[in-house]
Image (cartoon, rainbow, N blue to C red):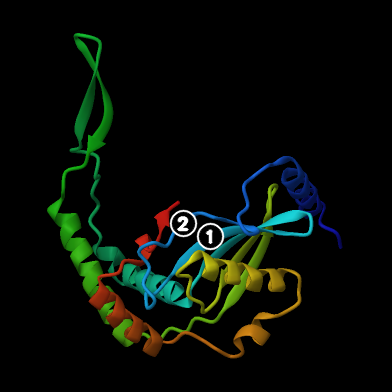
């Protein structure tokens, strides 16, 4: 049965692509810089836009290690939820003023004051995450989700791959293209591959040694 809403989104996405003039470089739009990437840097996520036929595909890629990390964080939050203090972080915020004219000023921002109870909670949360990563053997399998928007086909892709350069990103978009066009399947590309606790503990040691933060693994272009 045809979904009228999705069909309308497809029409709008194709119209958007015809009317929008963006600078595609080698067939893709890249949003990040890779200058600080090393040959052995662990990567976690990336974004790109590429073209398939007469519409755009907005690719949001994550490595299974990032999905695994988020599972650890979620379990730690669940275990410590009843210990989170009920604190209004903005109750004692210090206003920052900007002078307006000679004698007037207005609030342009606020600075939150550190709360010892929240600091203690976040210390507990980090400790709990360390416990969870040793106790709970999560498993992350590759996955793909597709959703049409009024400007592109959205593709969420979790795949074991490393993106350390624009060239790597280009290769990733070609993999994504083959999936979108149904020239390949995740099973054909990944088989029964899954990301396990053993993989995470190995990667975690590398991240700690390199002091690497997955949330800031890219510079914005």
In this picture, is 5 found above or below 106?
Answer: below
In the depicted view, which residue is nearer to us: 152 or 169? 169
Q: What element does badge 1 sit on?
A: strand
Image quadrant where residue 189 sits: bottom right
Residue under the point 37% across and 78% down = 40
Q: Is residue 195 left or right of residue 11?
A: left
N-term mark: 2 or 1: 2
On the image, the x and y values in percent for residue 214 come to 36, 67
Which numbered circle lies on residue 121?
A: none
* Badge 2: residue crowd in 10 Å (few <14, some 14–19, many ≥20): some
On the image, the x and y values in percent for residue 165 come to 47, 67
On the image, the x and y values in percent for residue 8 come to 79, 48
Q: CA distance from mark 2 to mark 1?
A: 8 Å
Image quadrant where residue 135 sits: bottom left
Residue 116 in view here: yes
**Which residue position holds label 1?**
47
Q: Residue furthest right?
A: 1
In the depicted view, which residue is nearer to us: 163 or 154? 163
Query: Would you say the residues marked 2 and 1 are in contact, meaning their CB atoms lie under 8 Å apart?
Result: yes
Which numbered circle lies on residue 32?
A: 2
In this picture, is 50 found above or below 62?
Answer: above
Q: Is residue 29 left or right of residue 19?
A: left
């Amino acid at each position: 049965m045809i979904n009228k809403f999705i069909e309308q989104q497809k029409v709008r996405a194709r119209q958007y692509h015809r009317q929008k003039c963006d600078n595609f470089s080698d067939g893709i739009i890249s949003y990040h810089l890779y200058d600080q990437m090393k040959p052995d840097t662990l990567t976690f996520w990336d974004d790109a836009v590429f073209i398939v036929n007469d519409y755009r595909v907005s690719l949001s890629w994550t490595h299974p290690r990032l999905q695994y990390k988020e599972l650890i964080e979620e379990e730690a939050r669940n275990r410590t939820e009843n210990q989170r203090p009920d604190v209004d972080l903005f109750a004692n915020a210090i206003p920052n003023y900007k002078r307006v004219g000679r004698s007037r000023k207005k609030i342009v921002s606020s600075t939150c004051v550190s709360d010892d109870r929240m600091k203690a909670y976040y210390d507990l949360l980090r400790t709990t995450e360390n416990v969870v990563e040793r106790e709970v053997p999560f498993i992350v399998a590759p996955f793909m989700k597709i959703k049409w928007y009024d400007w592109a086909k959205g593709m969420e892709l979790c795949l074991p791959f490393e993106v350390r350069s624009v060239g790597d990103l280009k290769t990733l978009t070609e993999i994504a293209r083959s999936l979108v066009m149904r020239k390949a399947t995740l099973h054909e590309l990944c088989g029964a591959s899954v990301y396990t606790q053993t993989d995470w503990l190995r990667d975690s040691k590398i991240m700690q040694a390199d002091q690497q933060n997955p949330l800031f693994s890219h510079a914005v272009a």
